Image (cartoon, helix red, strand yellow):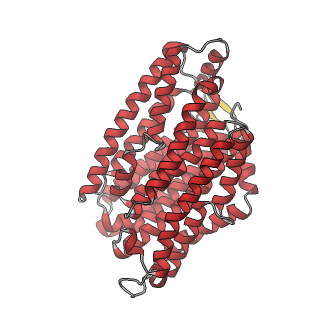
Amino acid sequence: MTIDYALFIPEFIMAGAALLVIAIDLFLPRDRKQWLPWLSLAGIGTAMGSTFTVVGESEVLYGGLFYLDNFAIFFKFFLMAIAGVMVVASAEYVNRNLQSHGEFYGILLFSVLAMMVMVSAGEILTAYIALELFSFTLYVLAGYATHQRRSIEAGIKYILAGAFSSALLLYGVSLIYGSVGTTVFTEISTELSSVEDIPIAFLAGLVLVVVGLGFKVTAVPFHMWAPDVYEGAPTPVTAYLSTAAKAAAFALMLRMFASAFAPAIDEWRAIVAAMAVMTMLLGNLVAIAQVNIKRMLAYSSIGQAGYLLLGIVALTPLASNGLIFHLVGYSATNFAVFTAVIAYQNMTGHKMIDEYGGLGRSQPFLAFVISIAFFSLAGLPIFSGFATKFYLFTAVADEGLLWLVIVAATASLISLYYYLMVIKRMYLNEPADPTPLRLDISMRVILAGLIAAVVFLGIYPGPLLDLIEDATRALPL
């Protein structure tokens, strides 16, 4: 079998860019370190550009281990775009608060490489290896602020929780292999379709795989690591965890469940539905009690994972489109919030919700961005959150799961309360320091772009939906 290695050019470029950034950092004088994020951004941009060379390809490589199709290409573009935003949004924070800048950006690029392999994986062990590489990079990034005790604590907690979830996932894979004799997604589906009674060992393995992936997507009751890690990690890393990590994990889940586990949907649907309900309700209810902005956003992110799980529960072409659509809209919106939080922390060092009081007077643009993003996360018209939730919830209801949509709508209503409490403080409270805050021009540009995307996707989502529909046609739904 001849492999065209040109199909892997984006991955090769990303790996080379990561090594190059780390190597160049060794020779750069301290006063030139500010070039590293732009070098990283150039590497991401080059990899994105090279991905255009494989657009339209539909290849199954290495006997089903690696897919190059519209689904993988869509997510590679999407995840690299998130990483590019992450680099720009984090540049000032990293320069002020972290050491070893080259290693930080190099590890970030390696995480993107791992995600690119994850979304192309067509076999469980290949996906597992990519997931572990991705997880290792996140463990390091979460504890990267070694001078802060909370960051070290976050890294240790993340490693322990991640190791436990990986062990469960790998044991589940062993049970699946032992019962059906393969780990290739399409072959698992074929084996399940050919038997009348699904083996008990396979069901046990499937439950363990669901549990392991539940840890990765912060689904309740496997979410306990997320609030502490989100709070303690450097703020740009928290933003990355809540968007890129969630997007890559759900892309893997969607391909795995559609390609491998769909014939057993009657066995696992109730489990995932229960996880979705608990995740939506607990995430949004517990967020109300939070006093730290990053911890509140952590529980908000948990609640959003519950909405995304609805797409897995329904597992129809329309529901898959809705899952990806909501994932894109949520990522743009959540990154807008976190970029604003990063900017405010850069200017003031504040992390508590009460410290956002009077922000509408001291920095109106920042308060405006946070307000728009919160309205979108709550699902209010005319923003992306409304369009994405409406599309996803309609798809789930069409599958006869109206009760899940009612729970999701209730959870969205609950979320509006704690978002409005932050907005109330920003506009009705007096600022502790009335001195106007000056926002860096690069942060203004990226915040304006993210909010424009949030509004655009809410008003005119057609072009994005066309791309998503092309992507999901690659799945056997």
Would you say 393 lies left or right of 89 here? right
Residue 191 occupies quadrant: top right
Residue in the picture at 55% in, 26% down: 123
Q: Residue at x 59, y 15 (%)?
A: 198
Residue 55 visible to the viewer: no
Direction from residue 211 to residue 57 in the image, left or right = right
Q: Position of residue 411 (x, y in %)?
A: 56, 53
Report whether 300 appears left or right of 251: left
Task: Give the x, y percent position of residue 186.
Answer: 63, 23
Q: Residue at x 36, y 54 (%)?
A: 104
Between 46 and 206, the one lying in front of the other is 206
Q: Quadrant of the C terminus?
A: top right
Q: Nearer the viewer, residue 246 or 101?
A: 246
Q: Left of 383 or right of it: where is 86? A: left
Which of 209/15 is in front?
Answer: 209
Q: Can the viewer see residue 389 in this picture? A: yes
Rendered position, 407 above or below 450: above
Q: Is 333 above or below relative to 108?
A: below
* Identity of the residue drawn at 60% across and 68% down: 451
Image location (x, y in percent) of residue 435: 39, 88
Q: Quadrant of residue 357?
A: bottom left
Picture quadrant where residue 116 is located: top right
How many discs appear? 0
Quarter of the figure with the N terminus:
top right
107 above or below 128? below
Residue 274 at what x, y percent from top left?
54, 37
